[in-house]
Image (spheres, helix red, strand yellow):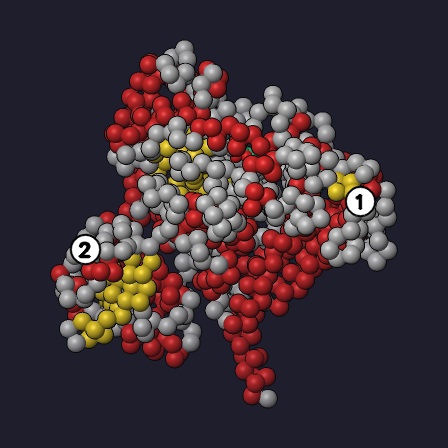
Amino acid sequence: MKKILFLFLLICSYSQLNAETGYDLWLRYQPIQDQTLLGKYRQQISSMYVDGNSETIRMAREELTNGLSDMLQQKFSSPSAMGSAASLIAARGTSSLLATAGIKELLAQTGEEGFIIISKNLSGKKRIIISGNTDKAILYGVFHFLRLLQTQQSISNLETVSVPKVKLRMLNHWDNLNRTVERGYAGFSLWNWHSLPGYIDPRYKDYARANASIGINGTVLTNVNANATILTKNYLEKVKALADVFRPYGIKVYLTARFSAPIEIGGLKTADPLDEKVRQWWKDKVKEIYQHIPDFGGFVIKANSEGQPGPQDYKRSHSDGANMFAEAVAPFNGIIMWRAFVYSAEKNVDRHKQAYDEFVPLDGAFHKNVMVQVKNGAIDFMPREPFHPLFGAMPKTPLMMEFQVTQEYLGQATNLVYLGPLFKECLDSDTYTSGKGSTVAKVLDGSFNKDQTLTGITGVANIGTDVNWTGHPFAQANWYALGRLAWNHSLSAEKIADEWLRMTYSNHTAFIQTASKLMMESRDIFVQYSNPIGLHHIMGTGHHYGPAPWVNNLNRPDWNPVYYHKADSMGIGFNRTATGSNALVQYHPEARKLWEDMNTCEEKNLLWFHHVPWTFKMRSGRSLWDELCHHYYSGAAKVKEMQQSWANLNPYVDQQRFDQVRSLLNVQYDEAVWWRNACLLYFQTFSKKPIPGQYEKPDKTLDYYKSLRFPFAPGN
Ligand code: GCW
């Protein structure tokens, strides 16, 4: 009886949770409800002191004061008189406050950005010390400490030493100057170019806080499909205004450079990277940028890709192009991230192979301050994609990972898809290029190259003006996961989901268990009802929304879905073995083994590498056709289960955010059925086999699905 009453009271109290928009992201700093824990925390943190007076320290102090005051429900401040009397001290290792703390050795390992959080007896009193070698490190430590409280961890015996595994942890915004966002599904661009630099939207600071809290230290403000206008004086003043807001949070600003800018805004006749006038133009432009933004990070460049101008327009190589920029930014310690996302309409070569063919011969030809930025897979951010064969294949060139956080191909902003498992699947893949265990993550972090100074992971942002930043409330988790993995790629996707859920929603065990499962399964479920068994690139034209495997009339063969699935009366899938395009040859022989034989190939990538007969016997005992039906149907059915799981979480979530997710899951179910029916009806025209009797038949015709149009779908 008592138990029932308790449950009743619990449900009453939760359903009165205040409505939230999601604006606060994972930085909600909710009052700690658990009284025992609250008591402990209050005792352990009776007073605080943040030492220093730089802008960054001021931000750290502000965050800690607000966070502690809100969570512990008592007023905190950091009075300058407090100093060594405080029970929580945040200070640089060189601070006299920590002279006797004995942390020198620890701090010798933490570099410029790493931090320590330790419990220590100092002058006869137990304290918590947050320290590092720079103010930025302290800021990171403060955010981490707040996270410990937000996720209700014990702070009794702290001995955290945390050092980022890669140096550049970035977001790439595909934001246009007119504020549309290419592949953006969360409203318009945050950057209000028109009102900058005069008006500084407070949101810019919240953006910086959120990024700093997960260790992101760079942001590329503009679309890789670049507009040269960003490099004009007017706009540089706007960029400077943003850089000034981000700087205290340790975030550097980068831009995309349009290769033809010397012609478009410089009045030159050519953009040839070996032309002296062009080189000088870029040098002057870069100098001008650094006059505005002394810590400008550098450029990201998409060249000779999907119609963008580039060095090949002048019969020069990618390294000629990259090195011209590298030379211009080198005096200012800037860097160049040169994208490897290239494939040509003229070449009749499997698109999968083109970047490798183009870039591997250039290994060693790039200047020291150039990174080659490689997407996680060789095609294009597909729902499931084997790792890009370039990882491990350019040992003399630092490679930057480019993930896509925005869900261009993974349900955009209507589907709940947690990308942690996708990121991890790639990072943990073994390239074998330096022996067993040469994971993509280790290639990135420089484990195999002692001379490598540049290391990095970036993600194409999913952020816009929507009040909750990301459109789908759960898409916030993908931004969060990108940052956390860039800091520490060995974190598990589960651990990251757990942290995010606790901070964003609730620490309640029942909530965490169900919600975490929901997240962890979501990506596989999406793959099942959209692109199972290694299918890829069968989405709608242009907007990439929904299924359109039948499309075969686009200008370039490799823009057509039929190019990728190759369904015919015999079977389905892309033969990338030696008897086909032989893209497999680009992988190390050991890595190749996972895929090269149709009979042993891991099934999740089977149709990526093989053209498989409809009657082929799968491990389940089913024929390929039946297996395909099984995946599409069970994928859609699992969305129903997701809806049910979410419904059960009602007591733990405020009504506003609960309803939004609930409604979106309804949309997701409809979209799953749409993918399932459209794909199966279409593939059936080749397999000529029935959809097994246990499944409900599609209630619409293939022609109906083919007739659907979405002229104003976002992100296009
Ligand atoms: O994923 C594809 C997108 C394009 C994008 C391109 C790229 C910015 O459909 O919108 O262009 O990749 O990564 O350059």
In the displayed structure, does residue 447 sit left or right of residue 180?
left
Q: Is 564 rendered above or below residue 134?
A: above
Residue 217 place in picture, x, y as percent = 35, 45
Residue pictured at 60% horizontal, 38% vertical:
584
Quarter of the image where the N terminus is located: bottom right
Name the residue carrying label 2. 52
Q: Is 190 rendered above or below residue 629?
A: above
Foreground of the two, 485 or 513? 485
Give the crowd class for mark 1: few <14, some 14-19, many >=20 residues within 10 Å: many
At label 2, the amino acid type is Gly
Residue pictured at 70% horizontal, 41% vertical:
610
Name the residue carrying label 1. 614
Q: Quadrant of residue 143?
A: bottom left
Rounded to the nearest whole Å, what is the CA distance between mark 2 and mark 1? 68 Å
At label 1, the amino acid type is Trp
What label does residue 164 carry, if any? none
At mark 1, the secondary structure is loop
Residue 121 place in picture, x, y as percent = 21, 73
**Residue 324 shows in the view:** yes
Residue pictured at 30% horizontal, 18% vertical:
280
Residue 385 place in picture, x, y as percent = 59, 44
Residue pictured at 33% horizontal, 55% vertical:
163
Ligand 1 shows up in which quadrant of the image?
Answer: top right
Mark 2 and mark 1 lie on one chain; the one further toward the N terminus is: 2
